[in-house]
Image: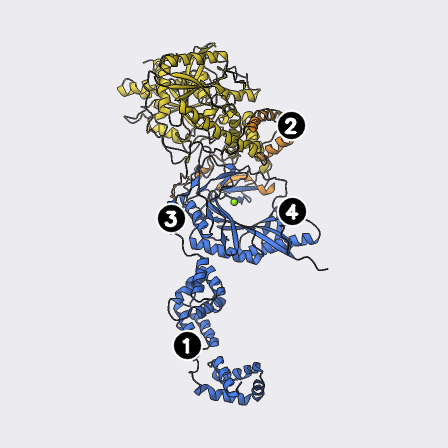
Amino acid sequence: MSAVEYEPVIGLEIHVQLWTQTKMFCGCALSFGEPPNTRTCPVCLGLPGTLPRANAQAIHFGLMIGLALGSDLAPRSIFHRKNYFYPDLPKGYQISQYDEPLCTGGRLGDVRIHRVHLEEDAAKLVHAGTSGRIHGSDASVVDFNRGGTPLAEIVTEPDVRSAAQAREWLTLLRTTLRQLGVSDVNMEEGSLRCDANISIRPVGTARLGTKTELKNMNSFRHLERGVNAEIARQEALLRAGEEVVQETLHYDPVTDRITSLRSKEEAHDYRYFPEPDLVPVAISSEMLAAAQREMPELPAAREQRLQALGVSAASARQLAWRTELGDYFEAALACDGAEAQPLANWVCNELVARVGEEDPATSNVSPEAMAKLVGLVAAKAVTVNNAKLVLDRLVADGGDPGSIVEAEGLGSMAGGDDELEPLVAAALEANADAAAKIRAGNMKAIGAIIGHVMRETKGRADGAEVTRIVRSKLDV
Amino acid sequence: MATTDLTALSAAQAVEAIGRGDLDPTELFEAYRQAATQEDLNAYLWVAQDAPEPPAAGAPLAGVPLAVKDLFCTEGVPSQAGSKILEGYRPPYTASVVARLAAAGAPLLGKTNQDEFAMGSSNENSAFGPVLNPWDRTRVPGGSSGGSAAAVAAGCAPWALGTDTGGSIRQPAALCGIVGLKPTYGTVSRYGMIAFASSLDQAGPLTRDVTDAALLLRHMVGYDERDSTSVSFPPGEVVLPSAESLAGIRLGVPEELTGTGSEQGVGIEPGVLASFRATLELAEQLGATIETCHLPHAPHALSAYYVLAPAEASSNLARYDGVRYGLRVQDDGLLGMYTKTRSQGFGKEVKRRIMLGAYSLSSGYYDAYYGRAQRVRTKIAEDFRAAFERFDFVVTPTSPSVAFELGAKTGDPLSMYFNDYCTVPMSLAGIPAISIPNGLSEGLPTGFQLAGPAFSENRILDAAHALEQAIGFDARPGRTA
Amino acid sequence: MIDREQVLHVARLARLELTEEEVGQMSEELSNVLDHIEKIGELDLEGVPPTTHVIEVSNALRADVVEPSLPRDVALANAPAVADGGFLVPSPQAE
Ligand SMILES: [Mg+2]
Ligand SMILES: [Zn+2]
């Protein structure tokens, strides 16, 4: 009997800090590491008698996100109060959207969007260390600088099927949000936060398993590792005949361990009700037009446009999802030195292999140089292998590919058979065994011939040319 | 002028006297400051130490001082909402309406006692002790703006600010024999008013006569960008009333609220009802037509109110957690600190309403309570709209009873809630309503309530003025104790 | 009707601590009030929209313009306990 195969079903909940000037419901400037409690006012401290006022720019950004994700924008949406006690929540409730959010539905890549809503961020709770203990117990210090920062919460449908897909999709979302200019989307700094709802089910079944909510994955790597760890945990439970319990879990990236966040009963009952201090948001045609006007080209559209230019599907996706890569590619393409597809190949494969996650625009390889190098390859002025050596040199020291080829004597042998044919003839003579095999139809043996010619020419010969001459000489 | 002469002037008269140069605003402030310091009704929780700088020449309120309910935030001045949990709390900012009135020339005289977080109809729920009714010190002044009402009635303030959520201006005004007006929801900014029930709370004037109410309201209304629910007053300005006749005015007397033949058992006291009928006769003599009308859902208003207001309150009062301000009762852990702080900081009635509100919002009960109450609210607003198609105003007794004895109802929350029977429907509908004194029953004042459509304050004030002239009520308490 | 268990549950939600006596009293008083309130259950409210705001206003949005924040000593002035420039509280983790 073969073991049951399990399939993960994953939905993501992403909180994005919006890049407004001021907080969601008050005029305090957003905080970027200022000393604690220097960005607060009566409203965001939740002082008695204060009232929230919604930030128009946050609504505007919310609409842009909705447009980018192809969501339905609610002509009328309202805020609710989500009631619970915690020291980082000054009013005893979070103002959020509940059953009438700003955006519903939509899709990004291969994942459907459930909804997008706006809310306010909580404050920061820092362990007090030695400076403060209360009655001998541990104490914390609350810093309200972050409290009230506008957040967009993006909730996906459970369309993700692996940790790697979750990571890849989140990259696309980050690129999209960055392109929109609505957030600086930095996971390490907390302006992009991702929770995952995870369940597993036997492959081929439709019924969803019990899901858990995994929190605190504060980098793309942690997201992938955390989700994998939780999938493994659930699978182990089911295989041992135990059950998955619906709960909120915390991923510890240091130990790679998953712990339950709420060990105590703490039945959650948020007692949502419409926020009486705020009035409905009614999207006017002006508001909609303003959001549409500011929509940049998004990765999905860029992917299509690049494909139309002749770039392969895989490269187009890579260039579109990594904005800086796409920008670099388009700058190089504009230099008129190279065709789209070979250029895309060189950028996505060879260049990325050498500069890694770094923005190529900040590397030593200028877009002009990249375009020129690809142009030299296309003109057969340099072989692919030697072009790679030129690229190594460009990455290390910069410069002009033409000059490097000349200085290093890496240029391809002049075209035509005059120079190459005697060399091939000599190689066939020196490798009679290989020549016989080729004649007998074993084309693999041609490697020995090419190798010989390359040694003789220090790599300046074109392998394809050599092959052509061999074929014509041996009549195969 | 002697001190008592100074405080005998109505606020509008004082404004006029100052304008003529017959009265020094600093002297007036000092006279009231002394009266407020010496009062023995427990109406004030804090009184200004010094008279402020006289207002700029031409300031419309001329420096006539103002008593302000404790729950309005006043910068650097205790603002405790009558609660132990905010004992000694001094906010870093001032409520919009208080700032607006100060700018118009009405400086802060003192902060007045109230039911804790405005929850109550007798002022017995104050953490700082009950307020006594100047007409009879064994009786309550009504609530929750009991301190403001008592201070004005006793001549310890020319006028005062109160707040009305389900009757908290109108009912104490009625029980203390003064005028109280609850404006249309949204016309007066709520910014800086410590919240009880956000969708119902509304600030309004408590004054000796209708003219003063109009004058104070004139400088209260107006859009405030700090309050999202705020609206500008559509007629533009509150006009000082001058009408002496009610010719052509149609008054509707809702059967459901006046108890005639109602099986709901409104329980309006005979003396209050007699006083109400006498005023209706007077209105007829002034030219009004009077007819019975119907507000079919009004009998359910109290139920809806006691779902909605506590629900909002349970959330509004969650911020009192001992973290940022107010009382903290230290305990071992966070949960202990929360529960001890809140259990010791809140009074009994506040805890009762927090419990009621949290219950009605809790999982599984929302639809049956909160959701239904919001729908009842819709029906009540519709009832009024229908009534105002046939009538200019709806009139009722303000309170089913005159001032009752201290302690008479504290043991029975439900009977206390019935004090709001006639005032709550207007609160739910968000419409303006005034209470004017219309006589005595067994030596105690009764109140006559006049309610109109949203933003009809000017017409309400005019009609109330005409009635006031005809009633000729003597606002000086005949002190019996 | 609201029984003992429900009273305790709601008290927990509202972070209130009730004595044994208060629990009984609360259960009785709230039950009385709820008995009265439950009469709204008899009304036919089919299709009636709920009212959250009695005076209809929408948007009331604030321009995204920075206003001055409070000086930190003012923000902390009313705090019952302060450390490291912040509001000192018992640690939630210690729960
Ligand atoms: Mg959220
Ligand atoms: Zn702020």
Mark 1: which secondary structure? Answer: loop
Cα–Cα gap, marks 4 and 1: 63 Å
Q: Are marks 2 and 4 in contact (CB under 8 Å)?
A: no
Kindly identify which residue carries mark 2. Answer: C20
Kindly identify which residue carries mark 4. Answer: A245
Q: Is residue B184 above or below residue B34?
A: below
Q: Amino acid at mark 4?
A: Val
- Which of the two marks, 3 or 1, is nearer to us in this view? 3
Kindly identify which residue carries mark 1. Answer: A379
- Which of the two marks, 1 or 2, is nearer to us in this view? 1
* One can see residue B43 in this view: no
Q: Chain of mark 4?
A: A
- Say which quadrant the N terminus of chain A sits in: bottom right
Q: Amino acid at mark 3?
A: Ala
Kindly identify which residue carries mark 3. Answer: A290
- Which of the two marks, 2 or 4, is nearer to us in this view? 4
Q: Residues within 10 Å of mark 3 (few under 14, many from 20)?
A: some
* One can see residue B223 in this view: yes
Colour in which the image shows chain B: yellow
Q: Are marks 4 and 3 in contact (CB under 8 Å)?
A: no
Q: Amino acid at mark 1?
A: Ala
Q: Are marks 1 and 2 on the same chain?
A: no
